[in-house]
Structure formats: C-alpha cells, structure tokens
Image: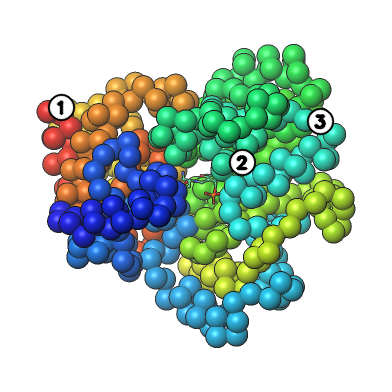
Amino acid sequence: MELTKSAAAFAEAKKYIPGGVNSPVRSFKNVGGTPPFIVGGRGSKIYDIDGNEYIDYVMSYGPLLLGHGAPCVTAAVKEAAERGTSYGAPTLAETELARLVCRLVPSMELVRMVNSGTEATMSALRLARAYTGRDCIVKFIGCYHGHHDSLLVKAGSGAATMGVPDSPGVPQAVAATTLTLSFNDVPALKKLFAERGKEIAAVIIEPTPGNMGLVLPEEGYLETVREVTRAYGALLICDEVMSGFRSSQGGSQSLYDIDSDITCLGKVIGGGLPVAAYGGKRKIMELVSPAGPMYQAGTLSGNPLAMAAGLAALRYMEEHKVCEELESKTAILCGGLAKAAKRAGVPVQVHRLGSMFTVFFSAGSVKDYATAAACDLRAFGIYFHAMLEQGIYLPPSQFETNFLSLAHSAEDIEKTIAAAAEAFKKAARC
Ligand code: KE4
C-alpha cells in the first residue's frame, strides 16, 4: 500500500493535534506504521488520500451497522440539515427516537440522549450514586466505558492498547471509589460484595465485553451478577454502547435475559453521528433533572441531525431484520478465518457475537483481561499489517472488536478469508 500522502498528513496533524489523532487508538501507535488518512467511505469500503481502497471492519468502531454512506441515513441527515442544525429546544425527532429505543430495549422505560458513550456512562454512574446514596462502583478489568475519571481505572480499549489502563490525572480519591474485579470470576464478585456490598452504588458491566477484544460471559455469570447486585441493593448498569443493536437487536441483555436497571447505548443509535443515551427503570430515571434533582445537561444533546441519522438507521435495522442477516454473515466469515489460521498452524481463538468478532492470537481460551493480555501481540501486529497491505482494514489493536455491516458482501468475505490465509502464514513465520 502506497501511504506517502498519509505519512505527510500524519506529520502535519501532529503539529496541531496530540499524537496527530483525536482518539488514541487511531494512531496505530501499538502496531506501528502510518494510519491511512481517510477521504471517504461507501458501503463496506473506505478510501484513503493515497487512493487505496480497503474493506473496512472498523466501521467507525461500531456505529455503521448499515455501512458507510447508507442512503437512508444520508438522505435523512441532508433533509434535517436543510431545516437547520441545532435549536437548543425540544423537537419531535427526540421523542420519536426515545420511543423507538424504549421499544427496542424494554428495560429502558425513560431515556436521556447525550453525545458520547462517555457521557452516557458518566451520567449513569451519577444517577446510581444519587439513587442509592452510596459512593462506590464496581467495574471489570479490561472493560472500557469511556474516559471519565471514575471509569478510567484498569480500563480496556485504547487505554489498554496505550498501556495506561490507570491513566495519570485521575485523583486517588476518585479511583478509590472504583472497585475492580476480573470478568467471569464469580468467587471474587461474591467476596467483594460480602465485604463491601453496602457501599456499592452500582456494578457497571459490558455484558459481552468488546474492549479487551470480544470476550463472552461464562454460563450463568451474568445471572449471578444480577442476583448479587439485587441482594445488596446495588444497581446493575449494562453498558451496551458497543453491543447495543450489534450482539442482537435488543442487545446482550436480551440475548442473556438480564433485567438491567440502567442501560447505556451509543454508536449504532446515532447511525454514525454523535448520539449516545442512558435510560432505565422509570423510578430511577425520574431522578434526572428536570424531573428530579440529579443534574445532567448538554448543549447538543438530541441534536436534530443526529436524531435523524439514528432514527433512519434503527428504523431500517428493524424493518429489514438487519441483525439476523449480519449474524449469519459473521458466522461465515469467522468460520473461514478459523480454518485459515488452522491451515497456517497459527493458534487463535475466534470469538463472535452478532455482527462483532475478534481473532485472539492465543493457544488457550480467552475469558478475561489477563488471558486477553497474554495473547501474542507480535503475531497480531504482523497479521494486522499483512491484512492492511492486502486492502483489509482492521482495528489496530488486539484489544478491539471487529464489526461487519449490512454492506459487506459475500465477495468481501471471500476476499477477507483469502487475505487472512496469507496473513496467518506470515504470522506463523514470526
Ligand atoms: P465514546 O465516549 O467513545 O463515544 O464511548 C465510550 C465507550 C463506552 N462504552 C463502551 C462499551 C465502549 O466501547 C465505548 C467506546 N468504544 C471505543 C472502541 N472500543 C471507542 C473507540 C475510540 O476510543 O476511539
């Protein structure tokens, strides 16, 4: 791949933006090399400023369920923009999207729109603390819930990728109210609650974590988390910013039948524009201002262009049963990847759920952050670059999840599997 223009663009960007990017994982810092500067996307493809075309499995880290430039989304945004871009006043579209979300995720009886997943989880924590009058929260090592202080403790995604799961700048007093556990560890969960259950306002969990790569809950684990939180009067916050409308149409709480007190959504809900949301049981959400005293606000929350994009995407998703189609496409792709790795003699674990998947470079099972972090990151880096060279654009980190879209064709999948066969051979030689 010729990346001359991107290399120059990256050098120029670093003059004005920390690390040349507006979100760390985009920098390719942990896999090395130059990140292609993207000029556009269409369907399953993205195009960089050097004229290269890629089959995209980042999909903006999840939002693009329908692919790049989905006509229904583009048309809806254009139409909304013709009328203006922001009002700072209520609009009908906000109610329409809220009503749709409440129907698609029934545990969300009231929902508040915000602008990012970080805002959604930050607000959900404040709400849980307001509702219970308790200060401590529990998160799981390797789960990522955005970059606000309370949750940037032993975090996954870019924090793990950059080697700063416990970022500097987080006050010790704040970090002290964040208690951490390993995912899938029932004894540790029960022990912590036995010792400190009365101090715990909430457990926040990615029910099917996607920020240490895609890790799945063991049989009965999520049910136990729900039972224990209920027994001690702590709230259960399901962070479905990534898994919402991805693991299934109703998210992972619907797949695993988990009754969530508060749910956070993002990514797909905005169809590629900045929308996230938090919502849950009416008696809890009625604490949120102006209905109640817990304050939370946002200049661009419920932005009309973003609402239009989210409504268009979710309506299309439901009407065309998109999640079902993506589930079968992802199964075909992951089956092919697993076969290609086996043929090349590279030990991998291929995890998939709905339209999400991760290839872990590990001979052993991956069930939490410790086992994900033990993966062969060097082999991953070789695989990543070999795929990029062949026009397959993957998330540049072992601790990220890949995403399919409705636009990925059978031909795209075949090409990806063929490219992976070559990439695994290269990784096998390392
Ligand atoms: P944002 O603030 O980035 O919109 O959402 C934070 C967030 C919250 N919860 C979950 C489960 C998430 O996955 C995220 C963000 N995901 C990462 C990708 N792993 C965003 C990519 C990035 O940081 O650039």
Q: Quadrant of residue 308?
A: bottom right
Mark 2 residue type: His
Residue where numbered disc 3 is placed: 134
**Extreme-front residue of the structure:** 15
**C-alpha span from label 2 to label 3:** 19 Å
The colour scheme used to paint the residues is: rainbow
Measured as percent of width and height from the top left, residue 24 is found at 42, 44
Viewer-nearest residue: 379 or 6: 6
Mark 3 residue type: Arg
Q: Is residue 287 above or below residue 186?
A: below
Measured as percent of width and height from the top left, residue 319 is found at 52, 69
Viewer-nearest residue: 20 or 379: 20
The reply to whether the residue tagged 1 has its Cβ within 8 angstroms of ligand 1 is no
Judge left or right: residue 269 versus residue 43.
Answer: right
- Closest to the camera, between mark 1 and mark 2, is 2
Viewer-nearest residue: 56 or 14: 14
**Extreme-right residue of the structure:** 292
Q: Which mark is residue 148?
A: 2
Name the residue at 24% across, 56% down: 8
Crowding at mark 2 (Cα within 10 Å: few <14, some 14-19, many 20+): few
Crowding at mark 3 (Cα within 10 Å: few <14, some 14-19, many 20+): some
- Can residue 260 be seen in the rendering of this structure? no
Q: Earlier in the sequence, mark 1 or mark 2?
A: 2
